[in-house]
Amino acid sequence: MTEPSIFTRILTGDIPGEIIASTDRLFAIRDIAPQAPVHLLVIPKTEQYRDVVELAAGDPTLLAELIAFANTIAAEHSDGDFRLLFNTGANSGQTVFHVHAHILAGGLTEKSVGA
Ligand code: AMP
């Protein structure tokens, strides 16, 4: 067995973290190191998919749910406009290999702002 991801540990209450919203298959938290005025993470409750490419191949319906959920949360926490970012692979900056989308919002001015 591999260790549960940091996001699974937040979901199960093993480590502290504020879950700001959830559905039956997804949850959202604030990023601990925000790279934009609003920086949230949307995460499938399952950690079986490492990245968005695996998620798209394995459960495209869940990916579509994730995008709809991100849209709802961005409207609740900012003006509804948002950037959705999936780091994919260590050389892209991915550090947690439990697929998650970054929602970046709130007065983004630079096209290069990432997470
Ligand atoms: P990535 O680099 O795309 O894998 O994104 C992982 C993100 O998780 C980073 O933006 C981190 O700041 C964030 N992160 C790591 N640990 C925590 C935590 N305990 N609570 C909230 N966000 C976290």
Image (tube, rainbow, N blue to C red):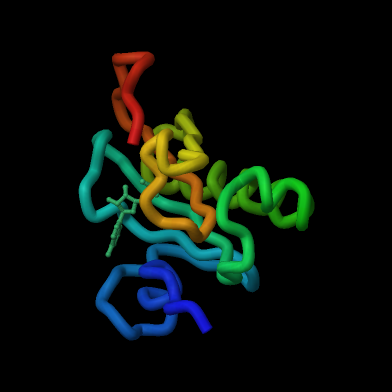
Q: Quadrant of ligand 1?
A: bottom left
* Apparent side of residue 30 relative to residue 62 in the rendered image (left or right): left
Residue 4 at x, y percent in the picture: 44, 77
In this rendered view, identify the residue nearer to me: 16 or 20. Answer: 16
Residue 5 higher or lower than 98, as above or below: below
Residue 64 higher or lower than 24, as above or below: above
Quarter-wise, where is residue 13 in the image?
A: bottom left
> From the image, which quarter does the C terminus lie in?
top left
Q: What residue sits 35% from the left and 29% below the top? A: 114
Q: What residue sits 42% from the left and 34% below the top? A: 92
In this rendered view, identify the residue nearer to me: 88 or 100. Answer: 88
Residue 34 at x, y percent in the picture: 24, 43
Residue 36 at x, y percent in the picture: 27, 34
Q: Is residue 75 visible?
A: no
Residue 35 higher or lower than 58, as above or below: above
Residue sticking out furthest to the left: 33
Q: Is residue 63 visible?
A: yes
